[in-house]
Image: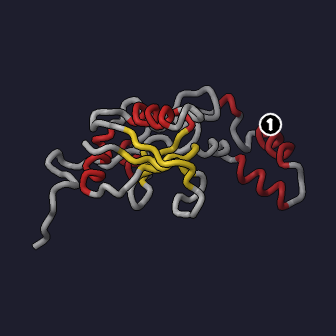
Amino acid sequence: MPPITVRVAFGPASRPGAVAQELVVEAAPSDTVAELKARVAAAAGGKVTADDLKLEFGPNARNIGRQYFRDPTVNEGELRLEQYSLLAWIERFPHWVVTARLLPPTPPPPGVAIQRAAAQAEQKNPDDVVADARSTGQIPKISDLPAPWGPKPQPEQDERELMAAGYLPARYPPESSPLNDVTVA
């Protein structure tokens, strides 16, 4: 398998000066996303941890693994690179790279963003408005929320919805591979 080139970027990787460094790491199809992230973090000199990284791949910047900090939707220790066809695509297009960025912060809990926006529009203190909304039951209390905001377990989600949202890689038949040219009649 070819080595993987990883661009460590802050901001759009296509912008000049946004690429902090370019690394080369080894990977196998059976490696997990967590293992690849650990290799990237080590190759970056330990300045970031694997848990800090968001990986993207290909010309459409396909997400690989978690999409935000403390994202409970994806188990990176179970997702394998072969599920993304990552190495097969790199074998076919060796100039394609993986981009590593810092994971964005966890989004606000349900209902909080709208309460904050309304408070700002009405020139009120957003923290007070959110606290009032929680106390009146307009938005749930943190103790009633699932991960990543609260202590409740994450509800089971349909795998097809997770694939459609880009959290999980699509499933293709075993004989399907980016290395096979397809002819259309």
Q: Which residue is mark 1?
A: 135
Looking at the figure, which quarter contains the N terminus?
top left
Q: Position of residue 152 (x, y in %)?
A: 58, 27
Compared with residue 80, is residue 171 higher up or lower down, i.e. above or below? below
User: Quarter of the image holding residue 141?
Assistant: top right
Compared with residue 31, is residue 132 higher up or lower down, i.e. above or below? below
Q: Position of residue 73 (x, y in %)?
A: 48, 38
Q: Nearer the viewer, residue 92 or 24?
A: 24
- In this image, 105 relative to 172: left or right? right
Rendered residue at 25%/49% (across/down): 88
Q: Nearer the viewer, residue 141 or 99?
A: 99
Q: What amino acid does circle 1 point to?
A: Ser
Rendered residue at 53%/40% (across/down): 53
Rendered residue at 67%/44% (across/down): 108
Q: Nearer the viewer, residue 48 or 80?
A: 48
Q: Position of residue 60 (x, y in %)?
A: 42, 60
User: Quarter of the image holding residue 74?
Assistant: top left
How many numbered marks does the figure carry? 1
- In this image, 114 relative to 164: left or right? right
Outermost residue to the bottom:
185
> Is the image coloured rainbow, by chain, by secondary structure, or in one colour?
secondary structure
Looking at the figure, which quarter contains the C terminus?
bottom left
Q: Position of residue 94 (x, y in %)?
A: 31, 55
- In this image, 52 relative to 88: left or right? right
Residue 75 seen in render: no
Q: Residues within 10 Å of mark 1 (few under 14, many from 20)?
A: few
Residue 81 seen in render: yes
Q: Assign a secondary structure to mark 1.
A: helix
Rendered residue at 62%/26% (across/down): 151
Compared with residue 49, is residue 175 higher up or lower down, i.e. above or below? below
